Structure formats: C-alpha cells, structure tokens
Amino acid sequence: FFFIESLNYLSAKETTLFGTIEPVMAILASALWLNLTFHSYQLIGILLIIVLILALSLKKQRNIE
C-alpha cells in the first residue's frame, strides 16, 4: 500500500530506488536491535546494493543534464 501511495509523490524510478535499500536497512536494524553479526556474504550484498543505487542515481543525473 505504501509503495503504491508513494507513486503519488515520487517518480516510479525514485520509488524503486528507495525500495532497493530496504534489505540494507533490514540487515542494519537486525544488527542493532537483535545484536546479530554480519557475515561476509551480507557485507558483499550491502556493497552491491549501494553500488547499484549509486550507479542508477548517477545515470539519472546524466540524463537530466
């Protein structure tokens, strides 16, 4: 519901970019609140998600200019 409602305020691309960061936030929240430890494959996944978000953001900025 919140994802669909956010389309009234953001573009589809922006909403999708925010949606891709959800797994990173879930890992961080579980580490902070549940005292879980990170494993190497989780850190690699976080880095890949951040790289994807940065790549899409930079591509979007180039298309605007």
Image (cartoon, rainbow, N blue to C red):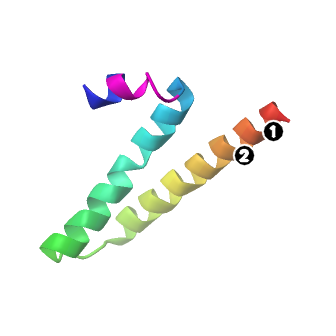
Camera-nearest residue between 35 and 5: 5
Q: Quadrant of residue 35?
A: bottom left
The answer to whether residue 15 is above or below residue 45 is: above
**Kind of residue at disc 1:** Arg
Left or right relative to 55: residue 43 = left
The answer to whether residue 31 is above or below residue 49 is: below
Residue occupying image coordinates x 43% and y 22%: 8
Left or right relative to 63: residue 13 = left
Instruction: Give the residue at mark 1.
Output: 62
Instruction: Give the residue at mark 2.
Output: 58
Q: Please state the horizontal and vertical placement of residue 33, each as a whole percent of the image.
A: 16, 72
Residue occupying image coordinates x 33% and y 57%: 25
The reply to whether the magenta stretch includes residue 53 is no
* CB-based contact (under 8 Å), mark 1 and mark 2: yes
Q: Please state the horizontal and vertical placement of residue 46, each as a whole percent of the image.
A: 44, 60
Secondary structure, magenta segment, majority class: loop
Residue occupying image coordinates x 79% and y 33%: 64
The answer to whether residue 25 is above or below residue 21 is: below
The reply to whether the magenta stretch includes residue 6 is yes
The answer to whether residue 24 is above or below residue 37 is: above
Left or right relative to 23: residue 10 = right
Q: Quadrant of residue 59?
A: top right
Left or right relative to 6: residue 58 = right
- Rendered-image quadrant of the C terminus: top right
**Numbered circle sitting on residue 5:** none
Residue occupying image coordinates x 13% and y 72%: 34
Per the image, label 2 sits on a secondary structure element best described as: helix
**Kind of residue at disc 2:** Leu
Question: What is the CA distance from the residue labelled 1 to the residue labelled 2?
Answer: 6 Å
| Magenta segment boundaries in residue numbering | 5-10
